[in-house]
């Protein structure tokens, strides 16, 4: 099986981590990190590109040497440099990187200062009160580490949805070639579009399971066959992800898909409805005695139970059953509803494409607008813009808009919120913008009340339109900072501001629960990609998935509106 992009990106990130732990050249480290992000979010398979003889050095920011390393990984081969660094760096050190507040630099300092090369040694040092002896480990970071260790941090993590998607797609394509297969679909938390998945569930309709089972267990990426029978099998893939496959007759496919999609709580609620009607519901169908009443499709199954079909994203037993019974399920937002993207970056800061390229890609997607939101100068790692550079960019965007037809590039910025809540750019330049996106990129360890007040003060600035990635979390990497998100949402409504649902797969910030909270408070959100390259505009679907899980409709999202309506919404009261 071809190596998926997520696996290549993971190896490049690991290489960058190990180099940084060893104190290597920061420019070299940064090159690997940029390459990891590029590969991880590339819509095309790198392995397919290599097999087709396409030169990877044509990708933005990828030189000949790095292209060769990526091609090596894409062919399934090992990198000698990565093997060498893996031998040199104690294995326990890399486990430390999963802890909040510990990047490679701090891990390097922990090792150099205290000889810490494992979770056990870190826990011992924390218990002995030695962590404050390490430069860069203040009381806030130390408290975070103590909490994380107490909560079992460092244990195996669930797979991000975007990574699972790269694994599921080729597996389904492979299975569809099995003789006798009639239907196949991924179920489980993947189909419910949860932000992470624990394992994968595949449901197949076939006249006979023998050929499907043979093909499934002989898949190239299978490392171990854990269980195999005539209608079910479980395997472990080379990346340690477990996949469960179930074969049913076509008459039962809808029932099996519903059953294995879950959630468990939703299924229990459905079974109770069946019991109350004197029926039996299982993965083979809905039965009255031995007579099957429904099961071929999910729609007929729900209808027989007196319910409208519940979208998979809502199946969490969080009120969707009553809504389905009473005809009150929301018409959820879709990717086709999106009219533009309000958070994208260009080469002016840390992006990889020009404003023109970003605009052309957005227009090709059917959008009517995008907002260029390059970082402010405070984000030195992102080569941010000061007031003078931003003023020049404003003029450049005006000239660009003169060239475009039927599309508008909004003048904007992602401006840093300083520790006390002020903004790093002056009001004079902010007042020239169509949109100001304010964000926290530092001081994540402030107490909740202080962090909350910090964001509220930022929104007091009449130029601020919205708050980007409002909790600061990175899935499987960094927890949300302490903040009263409900207070921030109420503050946004009172000030005429909005919050962003960031669609980057490693952020998905806000969560589905936050989306429902915003809806209840009456706060509209934006769904934006935080794209750093034109191809990343395609990540919008992950933000829409999250919004759907949060019960959001198109009218709950501001960038589903045409530009004149959006401009009206962006005017501060």
Image (cartoon, rainbow, N blue to C red):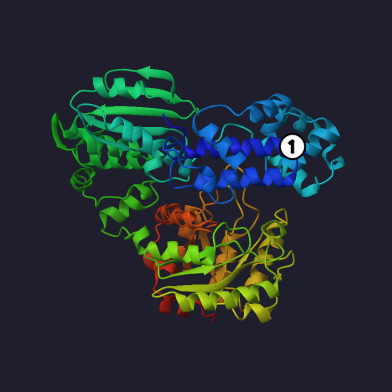
* For residue 535, side relative to residue 290 (left or right): right
Q: What residue sits 53% from the left and 35% below the top? A: 71
* Residue 102 image position (x, y, % from top left): 71, 42
Q: Local crowd at mark 1 within 10 Å, few (<14), some, or many (≥20)?
A: many
* Residue 61 image position (x, y, % from top left): 59, 50
* Residue 186 image position (x, y, % from top left): 34, 37
Q: Quadrant of the N terminus?
A: top left
Can you see residue 97? no
Q: Quadrant of the C terminus?
A: bottom right
Residue linked to disc 1:
21
Question: Quick one: 343 or 459, which is closer to the camera?
Answer: 343
Q: Eyeballing the image, is 458 above or below 305?
A: below
* For residue 64, side relative to residue 245 (left or right): right
Question: Quick one: 120 or 60, which is closer to the camera?
Answer: 60
Q: How many marks?
A: 1
* Residue 379 image position (x, y, % from top left): 69, 60
Q: Single out the residue that lies furthest toward the right.
A: 133
Can you see residue 180? yes
Question: Quick one: 17 or 477, which is closer to the camera?
Answer: 17
**Quarter of image, res 386:** bottom right
* For residue 541, side relative to residue 327 (left or right): right
* For residue 224, side relative to residue 98 (left or right): left
Q: What residue sits 72% from the left and 59% below the top? A: 380
Provide the secondary structure element on which disc 1 rests: helix
Q: Single out the residue that lies furthest toward the left.
A: 291
Q: Eyeballing the image, is 534 above or below 260?
A: below
**Quarter of image, res 352:** bottom right
């Amino acid at each position: 099986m071809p190596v998926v992009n997520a696996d290549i990106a993971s190896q490049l990130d690991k290489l960058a981590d190990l180099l940084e732990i060893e104190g290597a050249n920061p420019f070299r480290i940064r090159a690997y990190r940029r390459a990891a992000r590029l590969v991880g979010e590339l819509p095309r398979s790198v392995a397919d590109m290599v097999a087709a003889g396409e030169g990877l050095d044509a990708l933005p920011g990828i030189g000949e040497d790095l292209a060769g390393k990526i091609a090596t990984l894409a062919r399934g081969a090992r990198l000698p440099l990565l093997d060498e660094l893996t031998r040199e760096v104690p294995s326990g050190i890399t486990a430390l990187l999963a802890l909040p507040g510990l990047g490679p630099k701090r891990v390097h300092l922990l090792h150099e200062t205290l000889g810490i090369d494992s979770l056990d040694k870190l826990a011992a040092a924390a218990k002995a009160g030695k962590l404050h002896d390490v430069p860069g480990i203040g009381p806030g970071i130390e408290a975070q580490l103590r909490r994380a260790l107490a909560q079992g941090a460092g244990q195996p993590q669930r797979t991000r949805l975007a990574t699972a998607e790269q694994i599921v797609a080729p597996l389904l394509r492979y299975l569809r070639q099995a003789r006798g297969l009639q239907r196949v679909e991924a179920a489980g938390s993947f189909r419910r579009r949860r932000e992470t998945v624990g394992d994968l569930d595949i449901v197949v309709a076939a006249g006979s399971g023998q050929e499907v089972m043979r093909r499934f267990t002989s898949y190239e990426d299978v490392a171990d066959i854990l269980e195999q029978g005539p209608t079910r099998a479980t395997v472990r893939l080379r990346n340690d992800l477990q996949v469960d496959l179930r074969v049913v007759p076509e008459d039962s496919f809808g029932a099996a898909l519903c059953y294995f999609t879950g959630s468990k709580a939703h299924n229990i609620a459905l079974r109770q409805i069946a019991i109350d009607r004197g029926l039996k519901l299982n993965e083979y169908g809905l039965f009255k005695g031995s007579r099957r009443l429904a099961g071929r499709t999910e729609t007929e199954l729900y209808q027989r139970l007196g319910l409208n079909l519940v979208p998979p994203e809502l199946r969490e037993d969080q009120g969707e059953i009553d809504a389905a019974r009473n005809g009150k399920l929301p018409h959820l937002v879709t990717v086709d509803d999106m009219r533009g993207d309000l958070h994208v970056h260009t080469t002016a800061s840390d992006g990889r494409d020009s404003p023109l390229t970003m605009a052309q890609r957005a227009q090709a997607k059917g959008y009517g607008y995008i907002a260029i939101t390059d970082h402010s100068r405070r984000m030195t790692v992102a080569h941010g813009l000061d007031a003078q550079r931003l003023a020049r960019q404003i003029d450049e965007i005006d000239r660009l808009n003169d060239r475009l037809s039927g599309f508008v590039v909004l003048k904007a910025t992602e401006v840093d919120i300083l520790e006390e809540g002020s903004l790093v750019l002056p009001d004079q330049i902010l007042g020239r913008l169509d949109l100001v996106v304010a964000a926290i990129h530092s001081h994540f360890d402030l107490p909740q009340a202080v962090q909350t007040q910090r964001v509220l003060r930022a929104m007091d600035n009449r130029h601020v339109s919205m708050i980007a990635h409002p909790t600061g979390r990175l899935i499987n990497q960094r927890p949300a900072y302490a903040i009263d998100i409900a207070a921030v949402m109420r503050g946004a409504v009172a000030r005429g501001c909005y919050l962003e649902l960031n669609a980057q797969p490693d952020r998905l910030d806000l969560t589905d629960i936050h989306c429902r909270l915003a809806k209840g408070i009456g706060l509209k959100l934006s769904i934006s990609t935080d794209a750093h390259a034109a191809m990343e505009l395609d990540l919008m679907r992950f933000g829409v998935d999250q919004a759907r899980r949060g019960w959001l409709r198109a009218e709950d999202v501001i960038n589903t509106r045409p530009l004149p309506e959006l401009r009206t919404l962006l005017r501060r009261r």
